[in-house]
Every structure is written in C-alpha cells, then in structure tokens.
Image (spheres, rainbow, N blue to C red):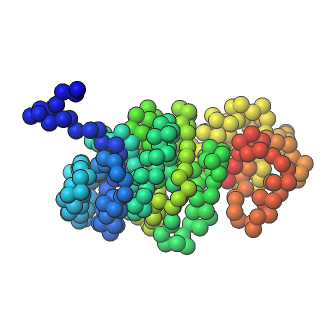
Amino acid sequence: MAEPGAGGRSPEPPVQVSIIVPVHNSECWLDECLKSVWEQDFKGTMELSIFNDASKDGSAEIIEKWKTKLEEIGVSVIIGNNDSSQPRGVGFAKNQAVIQSSGTYLCFLDSDDVMMPQRVRLQHEVAIQHPNSIVGCQVRREPLDSTERYTRWINNLTQEQLLTQVFTSHGPTVIMPTWFCSREWFFHVGRFDEGGKGVPEDLLFFYEHLQKGGEVFRVNHCLLLYRYHPQAATRSVLEETIWNHRVRFLEDRVLSSWTSFTIWNAGKQGKKLYRSLSPANQKKERPKPKIPVCHFRDASPPFVICVKLDLTGGAFETNLDMLNLKEGMDYYHFN
C-alpha cells in the first residue's frame, strides 16, 4: 500500500494535460479563449498555464477572473509574467508557459483562438497512442472568407501529405495553435527559438521535430476557431526568412539524397529556387548546362514542384496525376 503524503493525505496525481497560452495585449479575444478552456469535456486532470508577456491592456484582469472560475471546477491555473516594458516574444512566452507547467501532455492555444469543447479529449486520445508525435486538428477560419486556399490545405491534407508537404510556403502541415504533444517529446525536440519578432519559431520547431524522427497526425474534426487579423504574430515574419529556412530544409531532407532532379516551374519561383540552392545542388538540376525549358511531359522525375496548388481549377493537379508519380518519392511540393 502506498505511503500517504504529508498530513496523511495521498499525493496528488500528476496533471495529464497542460493548456499552454502565451498572452500579449490580448484583451479583445482572451475572454472567449479562456471560456473555451472552461468548456472542455475532458474528464482527466487539466491545468491552464498562461504567460503574460508585458501586456499593457486589460489582459491581466481577464486572466485573474478566469483563474477563479477555472479553479472552481478543479482546473488549476499557473500565471507567469514578464513585467518589463518590452515583450520578449511569442517563442519566449510559450517556453515559459511550458516550463512553469507540469502536465504529461501539452495543448497549445493562442490567446486569440477558441477551442471546441472536445478538443483536449480527442487529441489526448491520439497523443497517448503516438508519444513522439505532434497532433493537430482541422480548423474553422474566422472570418470565414479569409485565407480560403490555406484553410482548405490545412484541413484536407492526407496522412501521407502531412509529412510530404512540409516544404511549402504554408509552413507546418499541422498549424501551431492546434499542436498537442507529450511534455517529454517537447523537451527532446528542444523548445522554441526565442529570437523574438520576425522569427518563425513554430516552423523551426516543426523542422527540428521532423529531423529527430517525430511523427505528425491530425484529428479529422474541426476543434479550433482560428482567427485571422492584422495583429497576428505570424504576420510579422518576413517571407524571405521563411524562404531561406525552407530551402535549407529541402536540401537537407531531400536533395542530399537525389543525384539529379528537375524543377517544375520555368517562371519566377522556379528560377528563384534554383538561385537559392547551394552550388552542389545547382549542379544536380536537370537539364543543363543553360537550364533550358521543356514541356512537363518531356521532363524526368524526381521533381521539385514550384507551382501553386488549388489555383488553376484543377488543371495543374490533372497534369500531375497524368504522370502517375508518387508524392514523397518522385516529387515534392515547394510552392
């Protein structure tokens, strides 16, 4: 029989899930966000870990209000603060929220988004089966008509494409505000980059996760209201920064094992990709020596495809299907 804890009480069981919320000037959305934590139907033990990164608005008061409400239903709340005049950035805030938490699993939530009541329960069920994975979910975009192509891409990737379409400009194949993973795996990957504004910390973590053999899964239910607005942190990252990370990752993961390849796009994006490659990889590109243009039916795989998906009414996708190629072996998308 187990020894009771101090005062004759049994020790508290470990918290199963920590919900990780970084906050910076989020008063417009925070009430709805924290209400969605309160509404979770998960029956296990849960805590909320918030890190308030130098907010100057009413975020702190909203956090305190929900701390009381959540603790009334048995959800403990841990609050960390950066009290300086300047925010340290979303990577720092997420790391601090994780460090101060204690859950076996981590459920990431942005302060401007809203979880559906079954989110923690359904993602936890998948995560316990796949301890070295990041588990995402489908989303509903708010406003509905914003980023329609991106939203379709997030929600409709196949299980195989979650691993093959990791080089596109869309970024991680499961978006960061939907991530759910084990605490042990998070620290094995090694935390978020804390470079601050302009650093794609989610993309860098995702790439490191894949480099370390991590798996990617998606719960095929809409479990998050994903807001699009001008203040979103993702909009502060330069496109060129993301491009450079994508090219290096493509070279490491794919081109290093190909002896030759063809870039599918004779336009601006294809030429830019060729110029961005290392000299060693430029020499592998076919055809040479002056990189002439040929019809797609005359080109030889493997391909790096620099054509945007979901833009031609299906014409490009039909052309690709005609070639009977296997994604992840004969070609990768870099659109």
What residue do we see at 55% from left, 50% from top?
A: 218
Is residue 100 left or right of 234 when viewed as pictured? left
Q: Is residue 279 visible?
A: no
Q: Is residue 145 left or right of residue 35?
A: right
Would you identify the image quadrant in which residue 60 lies? bottom left
Residue situated in front as seen by the camera: 73 or 259: 73
Residue 273: image x %, image y %?
69, 47
Residue 126 place in picture, x, y as percent:
49, 45
Q: Residue at x 29, y 38 (%)?
A: 14
Q: Is residue 99 above or below residue 142?
A: above
Residue in the image at 27% along x and 41% along y: 100
- Coordinates of residue 272 in the picture (x, y in percent): 69, 49
* Relative vertical location of residue 27 with respect to residue 236 in this rendering, above or below: below
Residue 129 horizontal/vertical position (percent):
50, 39
Q: Extreme front residue here?
A: 1
* Extreme-left residue of the structure: 7
Res. 243 visible in picture:
yes
Residue 172 falls left or right of residue 320: left
